[in-house]
Image (cartoon, helix red, strand yellow):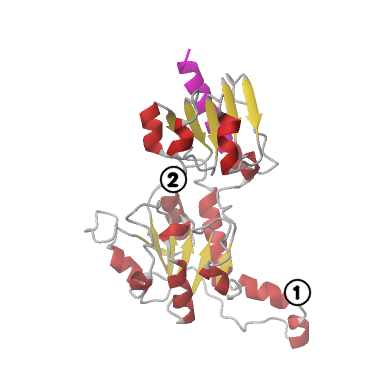
Amino acid sequence: MKAVFLDAGTFSPLVELVQPSGVSDYVVYPATADDQIIERCFDADIIITNKVVLTADIIHALPNLKLIQLTATGMNNVDAQACQERNIALYNVAGYSVETVPEHTFMLMLAVMRAIKHYHTKASDGSWQADGRFCLLDEPIFDLAGSTLGIVGAGSIGKKVGQIATAFGMKVLYAERAGQAPRAGYTAFDEVLANSDVLALHCPLTDETHHLINDDTIAKMHKKPLIINVARGGVVDGASIVRALNREQIFGYASDVFESEPFADDDPLLSVANHPRVLFTPHNAWGSVKAQTKLWQILCTQVEAFIAKQH
């Protein structure tokens, strides 16, 4: 079978992307533009991609296509209905990031709570020498111990974040879905908003969660929390975050995900990028070398199993 990998450049060069067994013809591209997809995949049996958008028109234009294998958990970039209509299998990869994303979450959390961006600048731009004291404490530093962490999205990643938070001495609240009575082990959504010192987002992007964090929900955040988004950019309304920071309704904002990736030039979040309690990373929380290697191993197993079923 022929497999075409459309955007291998989304992986680190340190990760060996071995050819799955059973693939007789393997073509790899670092990136693929929308107008190149059909030409490159016209005779492909398998498409491997991370974030290339595969619309219904594209899927229906590929006569040999049998499998779309994503190198990610999210599947928003593929028209699943078109796959179903054509009897094309659609696979994602799950379970590879249950360590790297929680670690990234706490990197963001600690960096903002302890004002790392501010103090790195002070330590390296001459400000410390000019001041002369052995330490600088002009920007407050806050401990995690004793604070409350609200978690929206209690899947494997959210639960792992909760375990780590407990080790730090934080109180953990898992948010029930907005508007629903809390199940055992969960806390009402509005109560989590009201009582969290840090609010961590780990939920999928759905119609229900689109712009879940907005002017109205921020107004319910009585403790002015740090908000951390490692879910999807669309879970948060960026303009609302900017207003909340300017009004001092929230302590800070740290995010690895954005509505347009990379940033659109007019993204409102860019206006607060230099805020001392704002920290952005370019959608790489998932991407430790260990996690990428595990992802590819899972992917190869899935592709190989699919090919074996065709014979």
Crowdedness near tag 2: few (<14), some (14–19) or many (≥20) residues, C-alpha within 10 Å: few
* Percent of width and height locating residue 32: 61, 41
Pick the residue in front: 288 or 266: 266
In terms of secondary structure, what is the magenta stretch mainly?
helix
Measuring 42% from the left and 78% from the top, which residue is drawn there? 249
Q: Under tag 1, what secondary structure?
A: helix
Give the mark nearer the N terminus: 2 vs 1: 2
Q: Which residue is mark 2?
A: 76
* Percent of width and height locating residue 58: 48, 36
Work out which quarter of the rendered image holds the N terminus and state it.
top right
* Percent of width and height locating residue 12: 66, 44
**Does residue 306 belong to the magenta stretch?**
yes
Is residue 18 shown to the viewer in this render? no
Q: Is residue 153 left or right of residue 127?
A: left
Bounds of the magenta segment: 294-311
Asked if the residue at tag 1 contacts the one at tag 2, i.e. Cβ–Cβ closer than 8 Å, the answer is no
**Does residue 228 belong to the magenta stretch?**
no
* Percent of width and height locating residue 134: 72, 82
Measuring 56% from the left and 27% from the top, which residue is drawn there? 42
Measuring 37% from the left and 31% from the top, which residue is drawn there? 84
Q: Height in image: 294 above or below 270?
A: above
Q: Which residue is mark 1?
A: 124
| Residue type, mark 2 in image | Asn
**Foreground: disc 2 or disc 1:** 2
Is residue 8 shown to the viewer in this render? yes
| Residue type, mark 1 in image | Ser
Measuring 36% from the left and 77% from the top, which residue is drawn there? 222
Q: Height in image: 100 above or below 257?
A: above
Q: Under tag 2, what secondary structure?
A: loop
Crowdedness near tag 1: few (<14), some (14–19) or many (≥20) residues, C-alpha within 10 Å: few
Q: How many numbered marks, from 0 up?
A: 2
Pick the residue in front: 68 or 63: 63
